[in-house]
Image: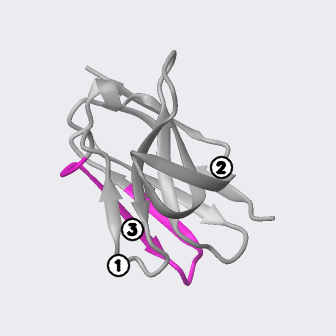
Amino acid sequence: QVQLVESGGGSVQAGGSLRLSCAASGRTFPMAWFRQAPGKEREFVAVISWSGGRTTYADSVKGRFTISRDNAKNTVYLQMNSLKPEDTAVYYCALVYEPCSGYGCNVRYWGQGTQVTVSS
């Protein structure tokens, strides 16, 4: 059993930045970030391979968000820049099986989520 704990969420104005962290209790594998806005389905945001050498992003965040990882700390990050009000959602990290993308992703474990609110 792997526990995932997100942190770093909060409120920011449009154009601002936030960095989310996801700390895992054990050895990690490919990791991903998802988000769920009120009244909408949970959607894929980004995924990173175990080595960190491969990343994939949703079109809606490409060029603004960066996923990275530090395997020595069992932690995955999501740097979010140029935030928009439509980025407002609960963000979840997940331990996933590859392949994983916006077309489909098999999730092994979910974190509890962290709220990100972007005001205009």
Q: Which mark is residue 53?
A: 1
The residue that label 2 is drawn on is: 111
Q: Quadrant of the N terminus?
A: bottom right
In magenta, the rendered stretch is: 62-78
**In the image: residue 112, left or right of residue 7:** right
Which structural element holds mark 3?
Answer: strand
Q: CA distance from mark 3 to mark 1?
A: 9 Å
**In the image: residue 84, left or right of residue 34:** left
Marks 2,3: beta carbons within 8 A = no
Marks 3,1: beta carbons within 8 A = no
Q: Tell me which numbered mark, 1 or 2, is placed earlier along the sequence.
A: 1
Residue 21 coordinates in the image, percent (x, y): 51, 58
Q: Nearer the viewer, residue 86 or 42?
A: 42
What amino acid type is highlighted by mark number 1? Gly
**In the image: residue 58, left or right of residue 6:** left
Q: CA distance from mark 1 to mark 2?
A: 23 Å
Kindly indicate the quadrant of the structure image that contains residue 86: top left
Q: Nearer the viewer, residue 91 or 18?
A: 91
Q: Nearer the viewer, mark 3 or mark 1?
A: 1
